[in-house]
Amino acid sequence: MAQANYYSAELIERTEVAANLAVFRFRAEEQPAFAAGQYATIGVVADGRVTERPYSIVSSPHERFLEFFVELVPEGGLTPKLWDLKLGSNILIRRRIVGQFVLDTTVSRHLMLATVTGVAPFISILRTQEIERADGAKLEDRFLVIHGASRSADFGPYLRELKELSLSGWLTYVPTISRPWEESNWTGETGRIEDIVRKHIDQLGFDHTRTVAYACGHPGMVENVKGLLARASFPQEQIKEEEYFKLHDAHPAERQRLPINQKLRSVATPNRL
């Protein structure tokens, strides 16, 4: 692989979120050009070989670092190598940053549904909105983000970030956990995204007449909410999706939670491998 196809990027910050989740920030030797919501292919060199995978970018194009929210898969090809990195270590990032999971500019209401690391492209979009609004841009977009996880620790630093950002008025953030019995102090929503999405879109007016929906993360959630939104009259072209792994890549416990007839398509950004 020709080095000309890559940027070199230095690990400048790492935040442990849980035993299998971490946030990585890198400083690239050149400022990459990309659109909020796209993904980068990152690689680690080991034993003379480059192992690389695509990951959704968390940071905004306006920020001077590249941020990734990653789930460790112990048997995966890349993530164990990322976990071995020390501050100051370097990785490779492909110069070509791509992806169609970007903000739809034909509407002003955006329903964003994410499981755990699937929030990554949405953070990029929302940070970009925040920065551009602070710079004086007259933006009319409104956002409803429903973020699901087993437990609140899995939201990482983004729970606080999105709660604070929601004070601005143009974002409603709804975190929900599926294991509330483990957290007696949790006062937010409980259940899976599929359990609560209709309630919130009905209450807040994010209906099919003026809203585009985006679903990102666990393939079971993606397929389930597509069905729910279709029954809420959302046409197929108003539902954007990105699945983070295939059924055969999932941990056995994850496979058991999926419907037996689940059909999964190819994955664009597997933030787990």
Image (cartoon, helix red, strand yellow):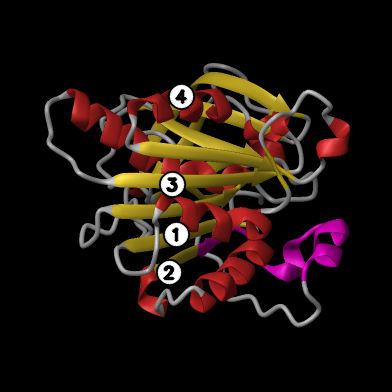
Residue at 58 percent across and 44 percent down: it is 147
Residue at 37 percent across and 59 percent down: it is 99
Foreground mark, 4 or 1, reads: 1
Q: CA distance from mark 1 to mark 3?
A: 10 Å
Q: CA distance from mark 2 to mark 4?
A: 36 Å
Nearer-N-terminus badge (2/4): 4
Disc 1 secondary structure class: strand
Foreground mark, 3 or 4, reads: 3
Dot 2, crowdedness within 10 Å: few (<14), some or many (≥20)? many
Disc 2 secondary structure class: strand
Residue at numbered disc 4: 10
In the shown orientation, is residue 37 left or right of residue 183?
left
Nearer-N-terminus badge (1/3): 3
Residue at 20 percent across and 23 percent down: it is 134
Dot 3, crowdedness within 10 Å: few (<14), some or many (≥20)? many
Q: Amino acid at mark 4?
A: Glu
Residue at 29 percent across and 35 percent down: it is 128
- Are discs 3 and 4 less than 8 Å apart at CB? no
Name which quarter of the figure residue 222 lies in. bottom right
Residue at numbered disc 3: 144
